[in-house]
Image (tube, rainbow, N blue to C red):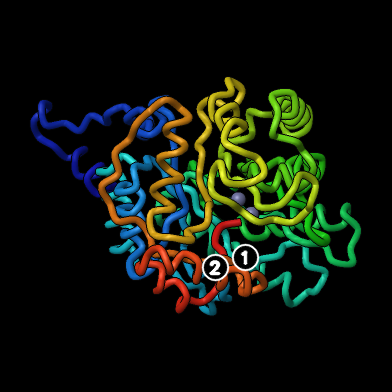
Amino acid sequence: MAEENHSSTLAFDAADEYRPEAPPPPEIPAWKDGSIRIGIHTSIAGDISSSLEIAHGLGANALQIFSSSPRMWNRGGMRIAEAEAARFRARRKELGLGPLVIHDNYLINLASPNPVLRTRSVQAFHQELVRAIALGADYLVAHPGSGRESTPLAAVAAIAQGLKQAARGLKLGDLKILLENTAGQGTSIGSRFEELRAILDSSPDLPLGICIDTAHTFAAGWDLRTAEGLEHTLQALDRTVGLDRVYVVHVNDSKTQVGSRVDRHEHIGKGKIGLEAFGRILNHPLLAARAFILETPIDAPGDDRRNVAALWKLLGRVVTANGDGMKPRPHRAKKAKSAKAATSRRAKTTSRTKQKAKSKSRSRGK
Ligand SMILES: [Zn+2]
Ligand SMILES: [Zn+2]
């Protein structure tokens, strides 16, 4: 572009003269039109762009993905080829999907007191940011990490420092990094809103925000089942991190009880939080304009479609889904025995579930 600029100064005719145009106003992405945004974590198996077709086909207008395998250290960074990223960005625009949320790799632990793991985590998070920028993501959701033998204070400092190191030298543009609250399992940081606030405060130069997961919030002891419980939770959130910093809500019902500190996602309305509570959450004025993203399990074909439809229904909308959705992906091996029993129960009623027994036990989304 600099050349064009230069040659224009040599123009003979005044009419040809190069007049620099005012820079175009920043383009506001279509998804920021104020409409309600319902998304679901979709698979990138095969081709990263296929996740867009899946989300669209399920009746979602937003989505979350992993930008690489979530349980592997990607040596060499696992960059996304520009042609592939460009195809993804163009197709996303065509489908009007947004926001695009990327969930970071599960192995990353910026709070690790082990220097090798910590360095690897910083490098991997750097690559997460590079891929998020390439794909034009709006948010990168990150689990804060686990301090192990460190104090929470030291862990918070390590996380803030790690984020800073990972983002060094990158132009993040409109990308925001969202810290997700946790269920409080083990020494994980982020089950207390104050810990999230401490990370925000320690990183004033980074575009940080918060992602609130309903299942994690519930497991961490906040009783979302009642209207009063929800009010109480939202007020506490506002006093600590500030509701204006909450951009995404992970909408998951919980297999475990309030305060269990155990993170097990359940279908909307089938868990301990319950359908009525989700109706209040989705329609709460203090949560308006947030993106609601499902990370519910897929135990049987159609579970993804049913969960998306359930959220729209709670918002008083009927949205048609004409896509196939994702293949069942049962929960993690710990529950293999009960999952197997459940599978055989279901197999009696439908032969389609037979394929499920073969697939490896794992859960998705956190
Ligand atoms: Zn979770
Ligand atoms: Zn989550």
Disc 1 to disc 2: CB gap under 8 Å: yes
The furthest residue to the top = 285
Q: Amino acid at mark 1?
A: Tyr
Q: Residue at x 36, y 69 (%)?
A: 351
Q: Residue at x 31, y 63 (%)?
A: 84
- In the figure, is residue 70 to the left or right of 328? right
Residue 337 coordinates in the image, percent (x, y) = 63, 74
Q: Amino acid at mark 2?
A: Pro
Per the image, the residue denoted by label 1 is 106
Per the image, the residue denoted by label 2 is 70
Above-or-below relation of 317 to 124: above
Residue 55 coordinates in the image, percent (x, y) = 36, 49
Q: CA distance from mark 1 to mark 2?
A: 6 Å
Which quadrant holds residue 30? Answer: top left
Q: Residue at x 43, y 47 (%)?
A: 63
Mark 1 or mark 2: whose residue is earlier in sequence: 2
Which is nearer the eye, 218 or 122? 218
